[in-house]
Image (cartoon, grey):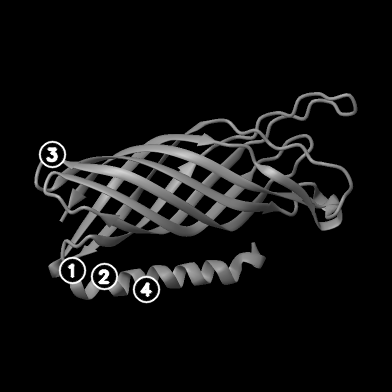
Amino acid sequence: MKKNTPFVASFLMAGCWFISFCSPSFVSAEMYVAGQAGVNFADRINSIAGTGPLAGAPGSFEDFDLQNSITYGGKVGYFHGHSWYGIEAEVLHATPHIKSLPRTATLDEVPGIHFRLTTIGVNFIARYPGRTLQPYVGAGVGAAIAHIGDTATVRSDTDVAVAWNVLVGLRAFITPKIAVFGEYRHTGATLKFDQAFGDLGGFSGNYRAQLLLGGLSYHF
């Protein structure tokens, strides 16, 4: 993870900026905390390529099919003066394990791999600030912390990569301070596990997923 130290440091600095930006205006602002959960409909990890000694290896690599999984997390939001635009800081966790690769004419079946993914990010939100219903859209960036487990053919490895997402949702207030919300989002990252095959190298690929989320928020 040393190769990702500058990125992680930059992300932490962005988080500090988020806090310092919000702090002076707490009195005239709308803030909320929320818990959320739903289903992570993971696509395949595609554009698989070798890294390290395997970089540029001839032949094509099979895409990795992923399991759908439960996803859950939380977020904190800030809108200055109850405006149309705001920001959210959030964390989400999912376990879209890599399915086994089927047997082929030249290779035996490759067992599945335990795969967990935690994303920490900041979203920029545009909403209609209604009293009861608030439709919203947003986009954001952050850090994807991905980990694969040991198998007979793969070593445990961790990567930290830039993640992105776009989202659309609807929030409905059930009291002046409590709201429920539903949300759809599309997210992705390019992951690189350089030590997955030990001294032989590793692999990289593009991760994509679609999420359906629901949650409860408390507004200050």
Label 3 CA crowd tier, 10 Å (few <14, some 14–19, many 20+): few
State the separation of the CA atoms marked 2 and 3. Answer: 26 Å
Residue 146 in the image, given as x and y percentages of width and height = 59, 49
Label 2 CA crowd tier, 10 Å (few <14, some 14–19, many 20+): some
State the separation of the CA atoms marked 1 and 4. Answer: 15 Å
Q: Amino acid at mark 3?
A: Ile
Q: Secondary structure at mark 4?
A: helix
Q: Secondary structure at mark 3?
A: loop
Along the viewing direction, whichever of 25 and 2 lies nearer the viewer: 25
Along the viewing direction, whichever of 87 and 216 lies nearer the viewer: 87
Q: Are marks 1 and 4 in contact (CB under 8 Å)?
A: no
Which residue is under mark 3? 174
Left-right relation of 130 to 181: left
Label 4 CA crowd tier, 10 Å (few <14, some 14–19, many 20+): few
Q: Amino acid at mark 4?
A: Trp
Looking at the image, is mark 1 or mark 3 nearer the viewer?
A: 3
Residue displayed at 28% across by 62% down: 86
Q: Secondary structure at mark 1?
A: helix
**Label of residue 17 in the image:** 4
Residue 150 in the image, given as x and y percentages of width and height = 70, 40
Which of the two labelled residues, at mark 4 and mark 2, occupies the earlier sequence position? 4
Which of the two labelled residues, at mark 1 and mark 4, occupies the earlier sequence position? 4
Which residue is under mark 1? 26
Q: Amino acid at mark 2?
A: Cys
Q: Quadrant of residue 208?
A: top right
**Label of residue 22 in the image:** 2
Which of the two labelled residues, at mark 1 and mark 3, occupies the earlier sequence position? 1
